[in-house]
Amino acid sequence: MTWCKAGRDLTDNVWRLRTLLSNAVDRLLRSESLVKMVLPILQRPSPTLIEPGLYLGTIAHAESREIMAKLNIKHTLSVTSARHRPTIPAGINNKWICLKDRQCEKIITYFPDACDFIEKALARQDEIKGNSDLEVQHLQQQPPAVLIHCIMGASRSVTLVIAYLMWKHKITLQEACNFIGSKCFIYPNSGFYMQLRIWEKSVLSGADMGSGVREIII
């Protein structure tokens, strides 16, 4: 009798747990805030153009030969975990940063290299604009572009693009967020946002790119 009762109690508890989990998942899926977060991401058939030659997107965009060819993307900056390292089409110059979307990750340590990579990739744009012969050659094709991406294109890659715009144009974090946010959905995690605050102080003070990095490491 005791074993039977224990078995019934265990079954009841498992059933209650399943019901609780089911209800929680149902509420989550029906959450208006979640829908507002996910839909803009799922409805991005192609990367978002942030500035001439600079695109922000997802891992699906980075792995698409069609998108790479259509937008003439020749450089990609990937920031994903090792488990989700992208398979970039052949012929693309790729820089991969192994980083998870966690608040504790020190993404600021990659800001200088990321800015340098993007700047060098976009330098080709300026070269073409300053050369009339090259401009004629590219009338029927977009100049080489660079794509910055993570998995969903909302946190890690957005953080790197924000850092680049702040450094490039010497603008505030809020200005960079407003600019990119007007074009697509952005959602850097709170840890990344705090590090962008540190980067902001470094950028606006005119300090070298490594000063913000040293501050957070120390």
Image: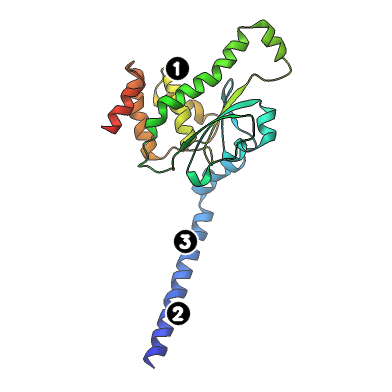
Disc number lying in front (3 or 1): 1
Q: CA distance from mark 2 to mark 1?
A: 62 Å
Q: Which label number is shown at residue 169?
A: 1
Give the quarter of the figure containing the N terminus.
bottom left
Q: Earlier in the sequence, mark 3 or mark 1?
A: 3
Going by the image, does 58 lie left or right of 2? right
Residue depicted at x 49% and y 58%: 27
Label 2 sits on residue = 11
Residue depicted at x 45% and y 79%: 11
Q: CA distance from mark 2 to mark 3?
A: 20 Å
Q: Secondary structure at mark 2?
A: helix
Q: Position of residue 66 (x, y in %)?
A: 70, 34
Q: Amino acid at mark 1?
A: His
Disc number lying in front (2 or 3): 2
Q: Amino acid at mark 3?
A: Ala
Foreground pick, 191 / 113: 113
Total numbered circles: 3
Give the quarter of the figure containing the C terminus.
top left
Q: Which label number is shown at residue 24?
A: 3
